[in-house]
Image: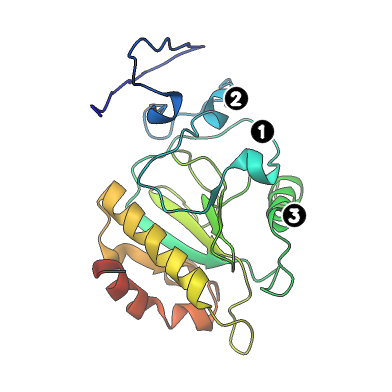
Amino acid sequence: MHKQGLWFLAAVSLSIVLSCGDLRAQDLELVLLAPLGMICEDVDFSVVEQSAFKDQNMPEGLIRRAGWGARFPKGDMVFDRNYKTIVVHHTQTPSVLGYRGGESVRAIQDYHMDKNKWSDIGYHYLVGPEGKYYEGRAEGLLGSHCPPNEGRLGLNLIGDFSKGRDTLGTVQRRKLVELLKYFCAKYCIRTEEIKGHRDLDPSDCPGDNVYNLLPQIRRQVCGPL
Ligand SMILES: [Zn+2]
């Protein structure tokens, strides 16, 4: 089908009337544009929440925010769509054994919003051991995962991949590689710009058991799945 492009520089509210017979709501992607660094205290985040029309190229297994019961973000969020680096993290808590699906993601969001006083969960996506992945902070907004955060898309592997703890399972690894392929293509990011958190910040994250695999994973991203 012919791809439709709709761009809005600014909108207080908007409505879209579908007049093409073969155009469905899920064929639309709502893209919010703003200069990098713009503070948007007055944005109605219900709009951001609805940016979630399915992108047909996204890997299978996505659980949207509504699917895991995300809280509504608080204000003071900043747009950032010019991603140049993908930062790989692990949760450490929970470990793979302690993972409870969406409940674990809600706990992470609670911690980030209530303890850290952030606007929302810090990462853009979180990947579960069973190969599902969760939409975190809306893509297109500045994350809170690796300061200064600008240009850094945050992918978090759920588990504790420190030495002697969890090892990265086949299914979770495969989903990570699929997501890295997808985001590298989408934002023209070179595989050298797939970083472990510790490459950019004093941190042990994403744990030796993932960090030591990153050279192999970068090669996998370049090759066939
Ligand atoms: Zn990290």
- Find the residue positioned furthest to the front: 21
Picture coordinates of residue 74, whole percent (x, y):
66, 33
Q: Are marks 3 and 2 in contact (CB under 8 Å)?
A: no
* Other-residue count near label 2 (Cα within 10 Å), few / some / many at <14 / 14–19 / ≥20: few
The answer to which of marks 3 and 1 sits earlier in the sequence is 1
Q: CA distance from mark 1 to mark 2?
A: 11 Å
Q: Quadrant of the N terminus?
A: top left
- Local secondary structure at mark 2: helix
**Of the two numbered discs 3 and 2 in the rendering, the one whose residue sits closer to the viewer:** 3
Among the two numbered marks 1 and 2 on one chain, the one whose residue lies closer to the N terminus: 2
- Pointer 1 with pointer 2, Cβ within 8 A: no
Cα separation between marks 3 and 1: 20 Å
Q: Amino acid at mark 3?
A: Glu
Q: Nearer the viewer, residue 134 or 39?
A: 134
- Which residue is tagged 2? 46
Q: List x then y, in percent, for residue 152.
A: 41, 52
Q: Is residue 119 visible?
A: no
- Residue 4 appears left or right of 156: left
Task: Measure how far apart labels 3 and 2 are at the Cα level.
Answer: 22 Å
Query: In the drawing, what numbered circle is on residue 27?
Result: none
Q: Is residue 5 above or below residue 219?
A: above
Q: Which amino acid, by three-letter code, is at mark 1?
A: Lys
Pointer 3 residue: 103
Q: Secondary structure at mark 3?
A: helix
**In this picture, is 168 found above or below 47?**
below
* Residue 69 x %, y %: 71, 42
Q: Which residue is mark 1?
A: 74
Number of labelled discs? 3
Task: Residue 172 in the image: state x and y as whole percent.
Answer: 51, 69
